[in-house]
Image (tube, rainbow, N blue to C red):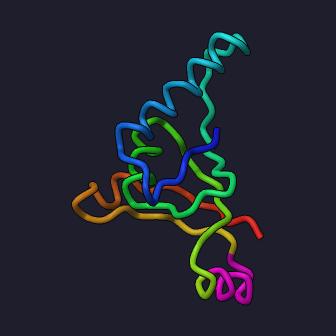
């Protein structure tokens, strides 16, 4: 399931997007089990708020491709394409950890 641009979308719109996606999966694909991995296709920013929301909605991991160029170069250089994203303390910290995988 893809998400909109987290850098500018308000929290309520993100929730609506998840609800629309879940409804589509249930009604059109006749699946009761919801996905556990979020795939963010060409998003312009990933926020702590999104990471926490994804965790709250039952996602165990998320893929994304856009991040700071220097950070991405460093990850590629070190062969590290995944990390545990821990939202800020005010967003429940370690209780909301989510595995993130960066696409090359």
The stretch drawn in magenta includes residue 75: yes
Compared across the picture, whether 75 is left or right of 83 comes to right
From the viewer's side, name the closer residue of 80 and 64. Answer: 64
Note whether 94 is above or below 22 in the view shown. below
Note whether 26 is above or below 18 in the view shown. above
Residue drawn at point x = 43 percent, y = 56 percent? 8
Question: Residue 28 appears in which quarter of the rendering?
Answer: top right
Residue drawn at point x = 69 percent, y = 72 percent? 81
From the viewer's side, name the closer residue of 75 and 43. Answer: 43
Residue 5 location in percent, x, y?
A: 53, 53
Question: Residue 1 appears in which quarter of the rendering?
Answer: top right
From the viewer's side, name the closer residue of 97 and 38. Answer: 38
Compared across the picture, whether 51 is left or right of 77 comes to left
Residue drawn at point x = 60 percent, y = 57 percent? 43
Magenta-highlighted residues = 72-80
The stretch drawn in magenta includes residue 79: yes
């Amino acid at each position: 399931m893809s998400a909109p641009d987290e850098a500018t979308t308000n929290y309520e719109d993100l929730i609506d997007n998840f609800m629309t996606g879940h409804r589509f999966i249930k009604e059109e694909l006749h699946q009761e089990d919801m996905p556990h991995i979020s795939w963010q296709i060409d998003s312009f920013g990933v926020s702590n708020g999104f990471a926490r929301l994804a965790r709250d909605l039952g996602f165990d991991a998320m893929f994304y491709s856009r991040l700071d160029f220097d950070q991405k170069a460093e990850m590629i250089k070190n062969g590290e394409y995944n990390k545990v994203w821990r939202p800020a303390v005010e967003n429940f910290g370690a209780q909301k950890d989510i595995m993130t995988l960066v696409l090359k």
